[in-house]
Image (cartoon, grey):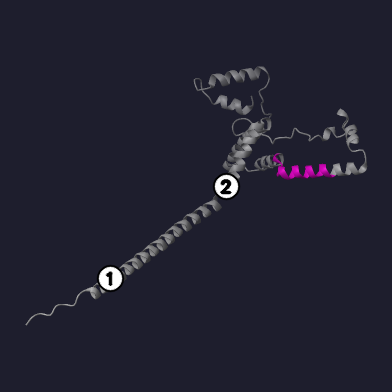
Amino acid sequence: MDAMELSSLNQMKIGDPGFKERLENGQAAAADGEVHHPAEGEEEEPAWLSGHGPAGLQPAPEMTQDCGLSDASGASGGAKERINTEYPDLLSKTFRQKDLLGKKIAIHARRGNDPYTMMAKMHDDIHAMAEDTEKTEAISMYNAIYAQYESARKNEDLRNYLSEVFGGLKIYADTKHELGEINTELQNITELYNEQEKEQVLAALEKKSKDRMAALEMKASEKAKKNDAKAPPPKKSKQ
């Protein structure tokens, strides 16, 4: 228990929620010699640096993988002997070197930005910020990322899931505006197409209807003329 925890305990009253538990923890810490009292003139660490409480800044993650370089001598497992057997001459070794370098370059290209460097930079940038609300919010954001980061390091399923979630989120954010413009233009052009097609269909129907009526009138006129020709002449009236 540090001085800040002691200070918070001193400000509590008997009966306050958590008082008994804090008191017991403080007594146990004192018995074990874990209570820290700042020396005269010594300043207490701010909460964000001490790591205590929800505002404490978590450390930057550190790599645990050595990428195999610690065993590069090949002493274990006879790695060099196996290589010499598979690639006995200089030419075969050269082709194998080119193949390995190509794979290495492809892996680095697939990896993109180094996550450890990114986290360390974020940590250092927050560490250097002035003590204000913005820094408190940045610490909370970093700590949330740090918790997921540390869990994902140990859990492949979680790594894959977070990669899909945040990869999908980036693609969604990057394409949202463009997709919105595409959808808007597509909707507008579809409505205009439908209106234009409707006008053309109606115009064609109207023309077809007029042509039909004109044909009917022509036939009716021709029939009337034929009937008039066949009709007997009118009888003369007697005087």
Queried whether the magenta region covers residue 56, the answer comes back as no
Residue marked by disc 1 = 223
Q: Residue furthest left?
A: 239
| 15 w.r.t. 45: above or below | above
Per the rendered image, the range of residues in magenta is: 98-115
Residue marked by disc 2 = 173
Q: Quadrant of the N terminus?
A: top right
| 115 w.r.t. 207: above or below | above
Q: Position of residue 12 (x, y in %)?
A: 53, 24
Mark 1 residue element:
helix
- Say if residue 30 shows up in the picture: yes
Q: Amino acid at mark 2?
A: Ala
Residue closer to the observer: 72 or 60: 72
> Which residue: 62% across, 35% down?
161
Q: Amino acid at mark 1?
A: Lys
Residue closer to the observer: 88 or 128: 88
Q: Position of residue 66 (x, y in %)?
A: 79, 34
